[in-house]
Amino acid sequence: MKIIVMGAGVVGVTCAYQLAKDGHEVIVVDEAQDVASIASLGNAGLLSAGHAFAWASPRAPGMMMRSLWRNDQKIRFSLKISPAQWIWALKFLRECSPQRSRENSDNMQRLAKYSLKMLENVVKETGVEFDLSRSGLLYVYRKQKSCDLGAEKVKLLKQNGIEAELLDRDDVVKREPNFAKIREEIMGALYAPGDMSGDSNLFTVNLAKACKKLGVKFRLGERIISLEQVNGEIKALITDKDRLTADQYVTCLGVHSRHILKSLGINLPIYPVKGFSVTFPMIDASKGPGQAGVDEDNLLAFDPLGDRLRLTSIAEIGGYNTSYAEKDFQAIIAGGKELFDGAADFTKPTYWAGLRPMTPKCMPVIDRSPIDNLWLNTGHGHLGWTMACGSAKILSDLVRQRQPEIDRKGMRYGD
Ligand SMILES: Cc1cc2nc3c(=O)[nH]c(=O)nc-3n(C[C@H](O)[C@H](O)[C@H](O)COP(=O)(O)OP(=O)(O)OC[C@H]3O[C@@H](n4cnc5c(N)ncnc54)[C@H](O)[C@@H]3O)c2cc1C
Protein backbone atom coordinates (compact mmCIF):
# COMPACT_ATOMS: atom_id res chain seq x y z
CA MET A 1 0.00 0.00 0.00
CA LYS A 2 1.05 3.60 -0.53
CA ILE A 3 1.01 5.46 2.79
CA ILE A 4 1.66 9.13 3.57
CA VAL A 5 2.95 9.85 7.08
CA MET A 6 2.27 13.45 8.06
CA GLY A 7 5.03 14.72 10.35
CA ALA A 8 8.72 13.83 10.69
CA GLY A 9 9.16 14.09 14.44
CA VAL A 10 10.23 11.04 16.42
CA VAL A 11 6.66 9.70 16.22
CA GLY A 12 6.36 10.12 12.44
CA VAL A 13 9.77 8.66 11.62
CA THR A 14 9.41 5.60 13.89
CA CYS A 15 6.02 5.06 12.27
CA ALA A 16 7.48 5.36 8.76
CA TYR A 17 10.13 2.80 9.74
CA GLN A 18 7.61 0.19 10.93
CA LEU A 19 5.33 0.75 7.93
CA ALA A 20 8.27 0.42 5.50
CA LYS A 21 9.37 -2.78 7.26
CA ASP A 22 5.90 -4.14 6.53
CA GLY A 23 6.55 -3.57 2.84
CA HIS A 24 4.47 -0.45 2.31
CA GLU A 25 5.52 2.40 0.04
CA VAL A 26 5.95 5.28 2.50
CA ILE A 27 6.23 9.04 2.00
CA VAL A 28 6.87 11.35 4.96
CA VAL A 29 5.83 15.00 4.63
CA ASP A 30 6.99 17.76 6.97
CA GLU A 31 7.17 21.52 6.72
CA ALA A 32 10.51 21.67 8.55
CA GLN A 33 13.77 21.42 6.60
CA ASP A 34 15.03 18.56 8.81
CA VAL A 35 13.47 15.65 10.66
CA ALA A 36 12.94 15.97 14.44
CA SER A 37 13.27 19.70 14.49
CA ILE A 38 10.24 20.57 16.63
CA ALA A 39 9.28 18.81 19.94
CA SER A 40 11.67 15.94 19.24
CA LEU A 41 14.68 18.26 19.00
CA GLY A 42 15.75 19.35 22.48
CA ASN A 43 13.71 17.25 24.90
CA ALA A 44 15.13 15.87 28.13
CA GLY A 45 16.07 12.58 26.46
CA LEU A 46 14.64 10.37 29.20
CA LEU A 47 13.35 6.98 28.09
CA SER A 48 11.36 6.63 31.19
CA ALA A 49 8.77 3.98 31.92
CA GLY A 50 9.54 4.74 35.58
CA HIS A 51 8.24 8.26 35.07
CA ALA A 52 5.09 7.20 33.23
CA PHE A 53 2.60 8.79 35.59
CA ALA A 54 -0.29 10.95 34.42
CA TRP A 55 0.21 14.65 35.06
CA ALA A 56 -3.52 14.84 35.66
CA SER A 57 -3.41 13.70 39.29
CA PRO A 58 -5.16 14.70 42.54
CA ARG A 59 -2.26 17.16 43.19
CA ALA A 60 -2.47 18.86 39.77
CA PRO A 61 -5.46 21.23 40.34
CA GLY A 62 -3.73 22.77 43.39
CA MET A 63 -0.49 23.23 41.43
CA MET A 64 -2.36 24.85 38.55
CA MET A 65 -4.18 27.23 40.90
CA ARG A 66 -1.01 28.15 42.81
CA SER A 67 0.86 28.69 39.54
CA LEU A 68 -1.40 31.68 38.82
CA TRP A 69 0.54 33.64 41.46
CA ARG A 70 3.68 31.53 42.10
CA ASN A 71 6.21 30.24 39.56
CA ASP A 72 7.63 27.27 41.50
CA GLN A 73 4.92 24.79 40.52
CA LYS A 74 5.55 21.66 38.44
CA ILE A 75 2.58 22.46 36.23
CA ARG A 76 2.01 26.13 35.39
CA PHE A 77 -1.23 27.43 34.04
CA SER A 78 -0.82 30.61 32.05
CA LEU A 79 -4.35 31.79 31.42
CA LYS A 80 -5.15 32.83 27.80
CA ILE A 81 -8.26 34.15 26.11
CA SER A 82 -8.61 30.83 24.35
CA PRO A 83 -11.65 28.55 24.42
CA ALA A 84 -9.36 25.69 23.25
CA GLN A 85 -7.22 26.15 26.37
CA TRP A 86 -10.19 26.33 28.74
CA ILE A 87 -11.92 23.29 27.25
CA TRP A 88 -8.68 21.33 27.43
CA ALA A 89 -8.07 22.47 31.04
CA LEU A 90 -11.57 21.38 32.08
CA LYS A 91 -11.02 17.96 30.50
CA PHE A 92 -7.63 17.74 32.23
CA LEU A 93 -9.21 18.57 35.61
CA ARG A 94 -11.77 15.80 35.05
CA GLU A 95 -8.87 13.33 34.79
CA CYS A 96 -7.46 14.36 38.17
CA SER A 97 -9.55 12.03 40.38
CA PRO A 98 -7.53 9.28 42.11
CA GLN A 99 -9.26 6.60 40.07
CA ARG A 100 -8.78 8.22 36.64
CA SER A 101 -5.24 9.23 37.45
CA ARG A 102 -4.45 5.62 38.39
CA GLU A 103 -6.09 4.24 35.23
CA ASN A 104 -4.27 6.72 33.00
CA SER A 105 -0.93 5.96 34.68
CA ASP A 106 -1.50 2.21 34.25
CA ASN A 107 -2.18 2.77 30.54
CA MET A 108 0.91 4.96 30.17
CA GLN A 109 3.11 2.43 31.92
CA ARG A 110 1.87 -0.40 29.72
CA LEU A 111 2.68 1.57 26.57
CA ALA A 112 6.00 2.94 27.90
CA LYS A 113 7.23 -0.50 28.96
CA TYR A 114 6.28 -2.01 25.60
CA SER A 115 7.82 0.92 23.78
CA LEU A 116 11.23 0.54 25.42
CA LYS A 117 11.21 -3.10 24.30
CA MET A 118 10.36 -2.00 20.74
CA LEU A 119 13.13 0.62 20.89
CA GLU A 120 15.63 -2.14 21.71
CA ASN A 121 14.38 -4.04 18.63
CA VAL A 122 14.88 -0.99 16.42
CA VAL A 123 18.40 -0.52 17.82
CA LYS A 124 19.19 -4.19 17.10
CA GLU A 125 17.75 -4.04 13.58
CA THR A 126 19.35 -0.76 12.48
CA GLY A 127 22.32 -0.13 14.78
CA VAL A 128 21.03 3.43 15.05
CA GLU A 129 23.24 5.62 17.27
CA PHE A 130 21.91 8.30 19.60
CA ASP A 131 24.08 8.56 22.74
CA LEU A 132 22.07 5.77 24.34
CA SER A 133 22.74 5.11 28.02
CA ARG A 134 21.39 2.00 29.72
CA SER A 135 22.33 3.07 33.27
CA GLY A 136 18.75 3.37 34.51
CA LEU A 137 17.19 6.63 35.66
CA LEU A 138 17.26 8.25 39.09
CA TYR A 139 14.29 10.32 40.35
CA VAL A 140 15.55 12.18 43.42
CA TYR A 141 13.32 13.52 46.21
CA ARG A 142 14.23 16.37 48.53
CA LYS A 143 10.90 16.50 50.38
CA GLN A 144 9.67 13.70 52.63
CA LYS A 145 6.18 14.00 51.13
CA SER A 146 7.59 13.44 47.62
CA CYS A 147 9.61 10.49 48.85
CA ASP A 148 6.47 8.94 50.40
CA LEU A 149 4.75 9.37 47.05
CA GLY A 150 7.82 7.79 45.45
CA ALA A 151 7.28 4.70 47.63
CA GLU A 152 3.71 4.48 46.29
CA LYS A 153 5.01 4.87 42.74
CA VAL A 154 7.46 1.99 43.23
CA LYS A 155 4.51 -0.25 44.19
CA LEU A 156 2.45 0.80 41.15
CA LEU A 157 5.36 0.37 38.76
CA LYS A 158 6.11 -3.10 40.11
CA GLN A 159 2.45 -4.06 39.74
CA ASN A 160 2.79 -3.10 36.06
CA GLY A 161 5.95 -5.15 35.63
CA ILE A 162 8.37 -2.20 35.64
CA GLU A 163 11.49 -2.63 37.74
CA ALA A 164 11.82 0.09 40.38
CA GLU A 165 13.30 0.48 43.83
CA LEU A 166 13.25 3.15 46.53
CA LEU A 167 16.73 4.23 47.54
CA ASP A 168 17.63 5.91 50.81
CA ARG A 169 19.98 8.88 50.95
CA ASP A 170 23.14 6.76 51.25
CA ASP A 171 22.18 4.57 48.33
CA VAL A 172 21.49 7.67 46.25
CA VAL A 173 24.97 9.04 46.96
CA LYS A 174 26.52 5.63 46.22
CA ARG A 175 24.75 5.60 42.87
CA GLU A 176 25.46 9.27 42.13
CA PRO A 177 28.59 10.35 44.06
CA ASN A 178 28.19 13.95 42.84
CA PHE A 179 25.17 14.20 45.13
CA ALA A 180 27.39 13.86 48.24
CA LYS A 181 27.34 17.66 48.45
CA ILE A 182 23.55 17.71 48.82
CA ARG A 183 23.41 14.49 50.86
CA GLU A 184 21.57 16.06 53.82
CA GLU A 185 18.86 17.49 51.54
CA ILE A 186 18.07 14.16 49.91
CA MET A 187 15.16 12.18 51.34
CA GLY A 188 15.50 9.32 48.87
CA ALA A 189 15.06 8.43 45.23
CA LEU A 190 13.18 6.14 42.92
CA TYR A 191 15.64 4.22 40.78
CA ALA A 192 14.34 2.55 37.63
CA PRO A 193 17.11 0.26 36.33
CA GLY A 194 15.33 -0.54 33.05
CA ASP A 195 14.92 3.11 32.08
CA MET A 196 17.38 4.61 29.61
CA SER A 197 18.31 7.92 28.06
CA GLY A 198 19.41 9.17 24.66
CA ASP A 199 19.13 11.98 22.17
CA SER A 200 15.77 11.76 20.37
CA ASN A 201 16.94 14.15 17.65
CA LEU A 202 20.01 12.04 16.80
CA PHE A 203 17.89 8.90 16.95
CA THR A 204 15.32 10.31 14.54
CA VAL A 205 17.92 11.71 12.13
CA ASN A 206 19.73 8.35 12.02
CA LEU A 207 16.53 6.30 11.85
CA ALA A 208 15.43 8.46 8.90
CA LYS A 209 18.62 7.26 7.13
CA ALA A 210 17.61 3.65 7.85
CA CYS A 211 14.13 4.46 6.54
CA LYS A 212 15.58 5.79 3.29
CA LYS A 213 17.40 2.47 2.83
CA LEU A 214 14.00 0.80 3.10
CA GLY A 215 12.72 3.07 0.34
CA VAL A 216 10.95 5.74 2.43
CA LYS A 217 10.77 9.12 0.66
CA PHE A 218 11.00 12.32 2.70
CA ARG A 219 9.38 15.50 1.42
CA LEU A 220 10.77 18.11 3.81
CA GLY A 221 10.11 21.85 3.65
CA GLU A 222 6.56 21.14 2.46
CA ARG A 223 3.70 22.53 4.51
CA ILE A 224 0.50 20.50 4.83
CA ILE A 225 -2.52 22.72 4.27
CA SER A 226 -5.43 20.26 4.36
CA LEU A 227 -6.77 16.83 3.49
CA GLU A 228 -9.25 16.37 0.68
CA GLN A 229 -12.20 14.21 1.69
CA VAL A 230 -14.66 12.72 -0.80
CA ASN A 231 -17.43 10.28 0.18
CA GLY A 232 -15.97 9.56 3.60
CA GLU A 233 -12.49 8.84 2.26
CA ILE A 234 -9.29 10.89 2.08
CA LYS A 235 -8.47 11.39 -1.59
CA ALA A 236 -5.43 13.65 -1.32
CA LEU A 237 -3.10 15.64 0.87
CA ILE A 238 -2.89 19.28 -0.12
CA THR A 239 0.45 20.94 0.59
CA ASP A 240 1.82 24.37 -0.29
CA LYS A 241 3.64 22.69 -3.20
CA ASP A 242 1.55 19.80 -4.47
CA ARG A 243 -1.46 17.52 -4.28
CA LEU A 244 -0.30 14.10 -3.02
CA THR A 245 -2.33 10.91 -3.17
CA ALA A 246 -2.04 7.62 -1.28
CA ASP A 247 -4.12 4.68 -0.07
CA GLN A 248 -3.70 5.54 3.64
CA TYR A 249 -2.70 8.66 5.59
CA VAL A 250 -1.16 8.72 9.08
CA THR A 251 -1.28 11.79 11.33
CA CYS A 252 1.86 12.41 13.42
CA LEU A 253 1.81 16.21 13.54
CA GLY A 254 2.43 16.70 17.26
CA VAL A 255 0.74 19.81 18.65
CA HIS A 256 -0.56 20.69 15.16
CA SER A 257 -2.49 17.45 14.56
CA ARG A 258 -5.61 19.05 15.98
CA HIS A 259 -5.57 21.99 13.55
CA ILE A 260 -5.13 19.91 10.41
CA LEU A 261 -7.89 17.43 11.29
CA LYS A 262 -10.41 19.89 12.73
CA SER A 263 -12.01 20.73 9.38
CA LEU A 264 -12.72 17.00 8.88
CA GLY A 265 -14.75 16.97 12.10
CA ILE A 266 -12.05 15.06 13.97
CA ASN A 267 -11.61 16.52 17.39
CA LEU A 268 -8.29 15.64 19.00
CA PRO A 269 -7.96 16.80 22.61
CA ILE A 270 -4.35 17.99 22.19
CA TYR A 271 -3.00 21.20 23.70
CA PRO A 272 0.63 22.35 23.91
CA VAL A 273 2.53 22.25 27.21
CA LYS A 274 5.71 24.27 26.91
CA GLY A 275 9.09 23.30 28.34
CA PHE A 276 12.67 24.56 28.20
CA SER A 277 16.03 22.84 27.88
CA VAL A 278 19.61 24.05 27.82
CA THR A 279 22.55 21.99 26.62
CA PHE A 280 26.24 22.54 27.43
CA PRO A 281 29.45 20.92 26.21
CA MET A 282 30.65 18.47 28.88
CA ILE A 283 34.20 19.27 30.02
CA ASP A 284 34.63 16.82 32.92
CA ALA A 285 32.27 13.83 32.76
CA SER A 286 33.40 12.65 36.23
CA LYS A 287 31.66 15.72 37.67
CA GLY A 288 28.56 15.15 35.55
CA PRO A 289 25.68 12.73 36.16
CA GLY A 290 26.52 9.02 36.00
CA GLN A 291 22.98 8.47 34.75
CA ALA A 292 20.16 10.74 33.70
CA GLY A 293 17.34 11.58 36.08
CA VAL A 294 15.16 14.19 37.68
CA ASP A 295 15.70 16.38 40.74
CA GLU A 296 11.99 16.07 41.39
CA ASP A 297 11.37 18.85 43.92
CA ASN A 298 13.41 21.33 41.88
CA LEU A 299 11.59 20.35 38.66
CA LEU A 300 14.91 19.70 36.94
CA ALA A 301 15.81 16.86 34.56
CA PHE A 302 19.52 16.20 33.95
CA ASP A 303 20.95 14.07 31.17
CA PRO A 304 24.53 13.30 30.16
CA LEU A 305 24.05 12.99 26.40
CA GLY A 306 27.42 11.78 25.17
CA ASP A 307 29.75 14.76 25.37
CA ARG A 308 26.94 17.13 26.41
CA LEU A 309 24.99 17.89 29.55
CA ARG A 310 21.31 18.71 29.05
CA LEU A 311 19.12 20.32 31.70
CA THR A 312 15.35 20.53 31.23
CA SER A 313 12.46 22.02 33.17
CA ILE A 314 9.02 23.68 33.16
CA ALA A 315 5.56 22.56 32.08
CA GLU A 316 3.52 25.59 31.09
CA ILE A 317 0.01 25.30 29.71
CA GLY A 318 0.00 28.57 27.84
CA GLY A 319 -0.44 28.32 24.06
CA TYR A 320 1.65 27.72 20.95
CA ASN A 321 4.41 30.28 21.48
CA THR A 322 7.89 28.72 21.53
CA SER A 323 9.83 31.91 22.19
CA TYR A 324 12.24 32.19 25.14
CA ALA A 325 14.53 34.65 26.86
CA GLU A 326 17.77 34.04 28.73
CA LYS A 327 16.03 34.66 32.04
CA ASP A 328 13.80 31.62 31.45
CA PHE A 329 16.88 29.46 31.96
CA GLN A 330 18.38 31.10 35.08
CA ALA A 331 16.82 28.74 37.62
CA ILE A 332 17.55 25.71 35.40
CA ILE A 333 21.23 26.61 35.09
CA ALA A 334 21.52 27.42 38.81
CA GLY A 335 20.07 23.97 39.58
CA GLY A 336 22.51 22.32 37.17
CA LYS A 337 25.49 24.12 38.69
CA GLU A 338 24.45 23.12 42.20
CA LEU A 339 24.44 19.44 41.21
CA PHE A 340 27.17 19.24 38.59
CA ASP A 341 29.51 22.19 39.04
CA GLY A 342 32.63 21.82 36.91
CA ALA A 343 31.05 19.17 34.68
CA ALA A 344 30.15 21.40 31.76
CA ASP A 345 31.15 24.66 30.18
CA PHE A 346 28.26 26.71 31.51
CA THR A 347 29.36 29.72 29.41
CA LYS A 348 28.30 27.90 26.22
CA PRO A 349 24.57 27.27 26.46
CA THR A 350 22.34 26.09 23.63
CA TYR A 351 18.84 27.19 24.57
CA TRP A 352 15.65 25.53 23.38
CA ALA A 353 11.92 25.66 24.07
CA GLY A 354 9.41 23.11 22.82
CA LEU A 355 5.77 22.11 23.06
CA ARG A 356 4.58 18.77 24.41
CA PRO A 357 1.50 17.58 22.46
CA MET A 358 -0.56 16.80 25.54
CA THR A 359 -3.94 15.11 25.91
CA PRO A 360 -5.88 15.43 29.19
CA LYS A 361 -5.31 11.71 29.87
CA CYS A 362 -1.60 12.11 29.02
CA MET A 363 -2.03 9.20 26.59
CA PRO A 364 -1.56 9.36 22.81
CA VAL A 365 -4.34 8.51 20.39
CA ILE A 366 -3.26 5.48 18.31
CA ASP A 367 -6.20 4.43 16.20
CA ARG A 368 -8.06 4.52 12.91
CA SER A 369 -9.93 7.82 12.70
CA PRO A 370 -13.66 7.99 11.87
CA ILE A 371 -12.47 8.34 8.24
CA ASP A 372 -11.47 4.85 7.15
CA ASN A 373 -8.13 5.54 5.44
CA LEU A 374 -6.95 8.17 7.94
CA TRP A 375 -4.95 7.03 10.98
CA LEU A 376 -3.97 8.76 14.21
CA ASN A 377 -0.66 8.43 16.09
CA THR A 378 -0.37 11.62 18.04
CA GLY A 379 -0.68 13.38 21.41
CA HIS A 380 2.28 11.77 23.18
CA GLY A 381 2.63 14.61 25.68
CA HIS A 382 5.60 14.50 28.03
CA LEU A 383 6.62 10.97 27.00
CA GLY A 384 6.69 10.98 23.20
CA TRP A 385 10.31 9.92 23.00
CA THR A 386 9.66 7.06 25.43
CA MET A 387 6.47 5.94 23.71
CA ALA A 388 7.39 6.47 20.04
CA CYS A 389 8.69 3.01 19.07
CA GLY A 390 5.82 1.15 20.74
CA SER A 391 3.23 3.51 19.26
CA ALA A 392 4.73 3.02 15.80
CA LYS A 393 4.55 -0.77 16.12
CA ILE A 394 0.93 -0.63 17.30
CA LEU A 395 -0.05 1.69 14.42
CA SER A 396 1.66 -0.52 11.85
CA ASP A 397 -0.08 -3.59 13.33
CA LEU A 398 -3.45 -1.84 13.01
CA VAL A 399 -2.78 -0.81 9.40
CA ARG A 400 -1.75 -4.41 8.59
CA GLN A 401 -4.85 -5.68 10.45
CA ARG A 402 -2.66 -7.56 12.95
CA GLN A 403 -3.65 -7.71 16.60
CA PRO A 404 -1.39 -5.27 18.53
CA GLU A 405 0.72 -6.99 21.17
CA ILE A 406 -0.66 -4.93 24.07
CA ASP A 407 -4.12 -3.85 25.20
CA ARG A 408 -4.99 -0.49 23.56
CA LYS A 409 -7.06 0.75 26.49
CA GLY A 410 -6.72 4.55 26.71
CA MET A 411 -5.25 4.88 23.19
CA ARG A 412 -8.44 4.71 21.13
CA TYR A 413 -10.00 7.76 19.49
CA GLY A 414 -12.73 8.84 21.90
CA ASP A 415 -11.40 6.80 24.87
C1 LIG B 1 10.84 20.34 27.34
C2 LIG B 1 10.44 18.97 26.89
C3 LIG B 1 11.03 17.86 27.48
C4 LIG B 1 10.64 16.58 27.11
N1 LIG B 1 11.27 15.50 27.66
C5 LIG B 1 10.93 14.25 27.27
C6 LIG B 1 11.60 13.12 27.82
O1 LIG B 1 12.54 13.23 28.59
N2 LIG B 1 11.17 11.89 27.45
C7 LIG B 1 10.13 11.70 26.59
O2 LIG B 1 9.76 10.55 26.35
N3 LIG B 1 9.50 12.76 26.02
C8 LIG B 1 9.88 14.01 26.34
N4 LIG B 1 9.25 15.10 25.80
C9 LIG B 1 8.11 14.87 24.90
C10 LIG B 1 8.54 14.57 23.48
O3 LIG B 1 9.56 15.46 23.08
C11 LIG B 1 7.33 14.70 22.55
O4 LIG B 1 6.24 13.99 23.05
C12 LIG B 1 7.67 14.17 21.16
O5 LIG B 1 8.82 14.80 20.66
C13 LIG B 1 6.50 14.39 20.22
O6 LIG B 1 6.91 13.91 18.97
P1 LIG B 1 5.99 14.13 17.70
O7 LIG B 1 6.70 13.49 16.57
O8 LIG B 1 4.60 13.74 18.02
O9 LIG B 1 5.95 15.72 17.53
P2 LIG B 1 7.02 16.68 16.85
O10 LIG B 1 8.40 16.27 17.16
O11 LIG B 1 6.63 18.08 17.21
O12 LIG B 1 6.79 16.44 15.31
C14 LIG B 1 5.66 16.94 14.64
C15 LIG B 1 6.10 17.31 13.24
O13 LIG B 1 4.96 17.76 12.51
C16 LIG B 1 5.39 18.79 11.67
N5 LIG B 1 4.24 19.62 11.28
C17 LIG B 1 3.34 20.21 12.10
N6 LIG B 1 2.42 20.88 11.36
C18 LIG B 1 2.74 20.67 10.06
C19 LIG B 1 2.17 21.09 8.82
N7 LIG B 1 1.07 21.84 8.75
N8 LIG B 1 2.78 20.70 7.67
C20 LIG B 1 3.88 19.92 7.69
N9 LIG B 1 4.47 19.50 8.84
C21 LIG B 1 3.91 19.88 10.00
C22 LIG B 1 6.41 19.55 12.48
O14 LIG B 1 7.27 20.29 11.65
C23 LIG B 1 7.11 18.44 13.23
O15 LIG B 1 8.28 18.01 12.59
C24 LIG B 1 9.63 16.40 26.13
C25 LIG B 1 9.06 17.51 25.51
C26 LIG B 1 9.47 18.79 25.87
C27 LIG B 1 8.86 19.98 25.18
Image (spheres, grey):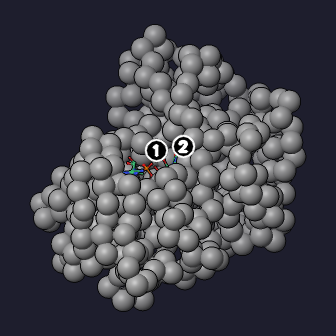
Give the farthest residue toward the front. 230
Dot 2 alpha-carbon crowd within 10 angstroms: few under 14, some 14 to 19, many 20 or more: many
**Quarter holding the C terminus?**
bottom right
Residue occupying image coordinates x 53% and y 34%: 322
In this image, 288 relative to 396: left or right?
right
Residue occupying image coordinates x 43% and y 56%: 253
Residue 289 point in image, percent of width and height:
50, 32
- Secondary structure of residue under mark 1: loop
Q: Is residue 303 visible?
A: yes
Q: Tell me the quarter of the picture where residue 175 sits.
A: top right
Q: Which mark is residue 355?
A: 2
**Cβ–Cβ under 8 Å for marks 2 and 1:** yes
What residue would you read off at disc 1?
39
Residue 32 point in image, percent of width and height:
32, 43
**Quarter holding the N terminus?**
bottom left
Q: Tell me the quarter of the picture where residue 119 sits.
A: bottom left
| Nearer-the-camera pick, 106 or 216 | 216
- Asked if the residue at label 1 sits under 8 Å from ligand 1, the reply is yes
- Asked if the residue at label 2 sits under 8 Å from ligand 1, the reply is yes
Residue 348 point in image, percent of width and height:
42, 14
In the figure, 226 relative to 82: above or below? below
In this image, 2 relative to 188: left or right?
left
Amino acid on which the number 2 mark rests in the picture: Leu
In this image, 66 relative to 399: left or right?
right
